Image (tube, helix red, strand yellow):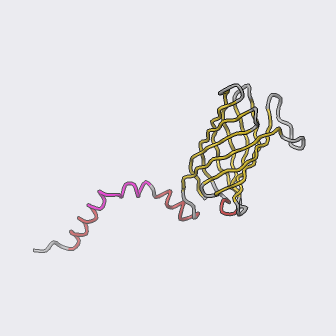
Amino acid sequence: MRAPFHSVVLLALTLAGCGQAPSAIADAPSLAREAEHGTRRRPITGSCELTFSPAPPSVPAPPPGILRQVDVGTCQISHLGRSDYRGLLDIDFAAGTQTGSRTFTAANGDQLHSTVVGTSAPSGPTTRSISATFTFTGGTGRFAGARGEAKASATANLATSSTSVVFEGWIEY
């Protein structure tokens, strides 16, 4: 005796519903956004070697008690490869905070922009430990409309005016 066709289909759908359907449903908004905008969330990691110096007089002066510095260097970043790094950072040593902006430029000229907020504290006679968050805010080329976030840790050496940074997070573009 054969079961009616619709009973077999109903049984197959019921069994399929016990598998991956809940995660597929939960991922539906993310998948819909990817399809609509051609973006998807990807991991991003990087490391940078920077030097810093006081901002030139042509840059507007910071509020009292704030040090404004220019950071330049090179990075190795997933999705960009070897890239140039340029940023402006306002540091409040008394509060142990910093805010600023960053631009990463890939070899082909595409740029990824970010803002940064963080904290710092002395870690030695001439060093400071830094914890920060980069928020990716767009860019040019393939990074136009990019968004994402990465957690960074760094060590700044005040004696050599250099900083080593590593970061890890996610990006959509």
Against 63, is 57 above or below? Answer: below
Please identify the quarter of the rendering in which residue 27 is found: bottom left
The extreme left residue here reads 1
Q: What's the magenta bit mostly, secondary-structure-wise? A: helix
The image position of residue 116, as x and y in percent, is: 68, 42
Quadrant assignment for the N terminus: bottom left
Check the image and name the residue furthest to the front: 160
The residue positioned 80% from the left and 33% from the top of the image is 67
Position of 123 with respect to 89 (left or right) is left
Q: In which quadrant will I find the C terminus?
A: bottom right
Residue visible at 64% across and 56% down? 146
The magenta segment is: 15-26
Please tell me in which quadrant of the rendered image residue 90 appears. top right
**Percent x, y for residue 140?**
71, 60
Question: Is residue 110 on the magenta stretch?
Answer: no
User: Which residue is more in the foreground, 68 or 122?
Assistant: 122
Query: In the image, residue 72 lies at what x, y percent?
Result: 76, 46
